[in-house]
Image (cartoon, rainbow, N blue to C red):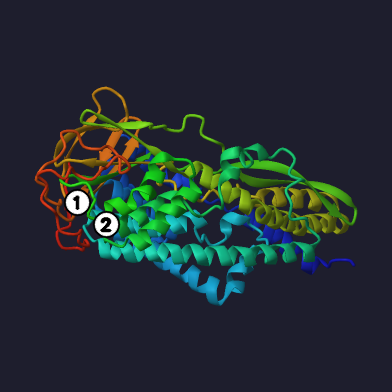
Amino acid sequence: MRISNFAVTPLVAALVLTGCVTTPTHDSKVAASLAVAKTGQIEDAIKQVEAQTQGKNENDLLLNLEKGELMRIGKRYQDSLNALNVADAKVKEWEENAKSNPQKLMAQIGATLMGDASRDYEGQDYEKVMLTIRMAMNRINLGDLDTARVDIKRTHEREAVIAEFRSKETVAAEEEAKSKGVSTGNKELNGYPVETLNDPEVLKLKNGYQNALSHYLSGFVYEALNEPGLAAPGYRKAIELRPELPVLEEGLKGLDQRTSFRRKKGVTDVLFVVEAGNSPARQSKKLTLPIPTGRGLITMSLAFPVIYPDKDAPQINTIQVGNQNLPTALITDFNVMARRALKDELPGIYTRAAIRAAVKGVAQDQINKNFGALAGLAANIAVAATESNADDRLWRSLPERVFVARAFLPPGDYDVNFTGRPGETSKISVDGRYMVVPVRLYQNKTYLGDLAKFGTITPVAQVEDKPATTAQDAKPAAKKNVVKPKPAQGTTNTGATAVKTN
């Protein structure tokens, strides 16, 4: 069938016009802010992102995630919550559609002329989960365990929505590809570094959205609220997601003792959450795909996202608290999570790219056939111009890695070294029944967040000279000369404080 001049000319014009549009990548928007934050100028970093969330970008999902995270690092917890609430409203819309109108979301499965970067950004699934966890962590720093509990419950509900929707989306993507005669596999992606998605750390992950930090934190919050029945599943799920880590296993093993009359007296249960670096960036890699047309195969260059493993990823094995060295657990690695998410997403990316290439290939072939070499050359240039870089949108200000350590410590002031480098010490004041110490580490800067303290220490007539350093080591106090304490009471907002640190 011959395509008329009327039909083809607008298509060529559309290709040329869209090819002239260039959009800054997300990484280029936030790179300067991240670099400034690493030098210790966190307020300057926040101002840069705030300037970008003006006007039409005021409710931008990703920019508000970036702003909220930088504000959290800067100990502006309520401001951080305000920004994250804007992002959360967007994710709630996605959740409602995922539950009641999934076809509306799946409409984006189809190819777009300008590529994936032109699609609405809904957030990576692990970002959606971390959003409510970040909100819970801000509440903790504000001394509000009760509302943190609500955010944690929403996290579990959000994970369930994601799981159900992704199963439906997979089926829909396969049907879409089948109707267009396109394979959903990535076997034809010659030159794509598939080893970045198939390394053992990526393959060990159960999925691309659940992380052990969120579930361990839920266990800690429920425990602090004297709800051990809800705390246990949180600790258990964290172990399932990150097995064979003693620090996590001790959280579950010692739960009954910590929430009973046998609890260690005269000490504070301290949770250190040590976050390092920034989550990875997506890079764009051009690959050549063969496209069948009525006049034979043509080749077309298409952009695909790539995330490379970080060979220099930060590693923290212990933290020094006073004269003790506390073992840590690498509980979440967002470089690995981002690659697992990309692995799950790649078949859909490939399908959209192949459909987009097929549409462009047919147009290019028809122009060559009907309008001659000169028009064909113009079409070739236009088609190449309309293939933008791969979608690089990710929540970059999240940490790359998260470590946790936990200890029973007697009240008092401590020098803490989180990096192991001589002279890099911070001071903390331990108090309360439960305490959370948030830390963000960069190569040349340590940000110590406000210390969140909850409840009061159970009194004791005699405290051992040397306290246990882990929950597992905690033993009942000697019966001799010990005043029998009252059963542990639940913790609420009453008595909860967030202590400012310099």
Disc 1 crowd, CA 10 A, few/some/many (<14, 14-19, 20+): many
Q: Which mark is residue 433?
A: 1
Number of on-image labels: 2
Residue at image position (65%, 46%) is: 303
Label 1 SS: loop
Foreground of the two, 227 or 438: 227
Residue 404's x, y, as percent? 35, 42
Q: Is residue 202 above or below residue 443?
A: below
141 horizontally vs 293: left or right: left
The N terminus is located in which quarter? bottom right
Residue at 89% from the left image edge and 57% from the top image edge: 294
Observer able to see residue 164: yes
- State the residue position of label 2: 224
The answer to the question of whether label 2 and label 1 lie on touching residues, with beta carbons closer than 8 A, is: yes
Which residue is drawn at the image coordinates 40% and 68% (left, top)? 89
Circle 2 SS class: helix
Residue 335 in percent (x, y) is at: 50, 42
Mark 2 → mark 1, Cα distance in angstroms: 8 Å
Can you give x and y, in whole percent of width and height, for residue 347 in the image?
Answer: 68, 53
Which sits earlier in the primary sequence, circle 2 or circle 1? 2
Q: In the picture provided, is 456 more to the left or to the right than 95? A: left
Query: Which amino acid, by three-letter code, is at mark 1?
Result: Arg
For residue 55, the mark is none
- Please say if 232 is above or below 266: below
Q: Nearer the viewer, residue 341 or 121?
A: 341
- Position in image of residue 380 (x %, y %): 76, 49
**Residue 51 makes an appearance in the image:** no
Please identify the quarter of the rendering in which residue 34 is found. top left
**Left or right: where does residue 426 sit relative to residue 361?**
left
- Residue at (58, 69) in percent of width and height: 105
Of 45 and 92, nearer the camera is: 92
